[in-house]
Image (cartoon, grey):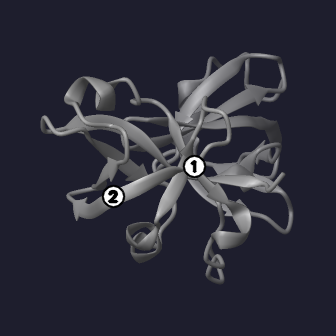
Amino acid sequence: MEQQSVIGKIVGAHGIRGEVKLLPLIDDVDFLLELEELTLSGEAEVPRTIEASRAHKQVLLVKLEGVETRNAAEALVGRDALVPGELLPQTPEGCFKLKTLLGLSVVDRAGGTLGKVRDVSLYGERSVLEVVLSGGLDVAVPFVAEYVAGVDLDHSTVTVTEAFQRLLAPEEVGR
């Protein structure tokens, strides 16, 4: 079986004719607009035909075969959109896929280990790192510059800012 890769998440319904709002999780919107089919998480590996798609604000509006009503579109909210990994465009130099953050060490600017990235989730239109601190506490942190200073894939680390550390109880840091 082919390895499937997540390319987006259905975050809402649009209109009354069954269109879904697909939040892209890859940068190449042209690639997404040219797709002819995709698979949805939670369904038996059966690809769905894309009848039409267009860009709209921060999402794509996608009409899937067999989804004819708003209610049918709303039933798909929360599902991941997947395509075979070999179809994905190459990642540009200096960029990375969010799933590559899984398992990376979370460190402060001095290099001290605070924990590990357990998961990367999508809340609305924002990516959130789920971090397990060294003391066992789980925290969720928005993947934004205010809290994440950088990612170093060569050293397998995510460096967090002082603002991230202020979110934690003092006794949890460095445990």
- How many residues crowd around disc 1 within 10 Å: few (fewer than 14), some, or many (20 or more)? some
Q: Position of residue 145 (x, y in %)?
A: 48, 54
**Secondary structure of the residue carrying numbered label 1:** loop
In the image, what residue type sits under mark 1?
Pro
Residue type indicated by callout 2: Glu
Q: Is residue 137 above or below residue 149?
A: above
Residue 144 position within the rendered picture, expressed as x and y whole percent measured from the top left: 47, 50
Mark 2 lies on a secondary structure that is strand
Up/down of 5 relative to 118, above or below: below
* Depth check, front residue: 60 or 67: 67
Kindly identify which residue carries mark 2: 51
Mark 1–mark 2 distance (CA, rounded to whole Å): 13 Å
- Number of marks present in the image shown: 2
103 sits to left or right of 85: right
Residue at (81% x, 52% y) in the render: 111
Q: Are marks 1 and 2 in contact (CB under 8 Å)?
A: no
Q: Nearer the viewer, residue 28 or 67?
A: 67
The residue located at (66%, 66%) in the rendering is 96
Instruction: Decide: is 97 above or below 107.
Output: below
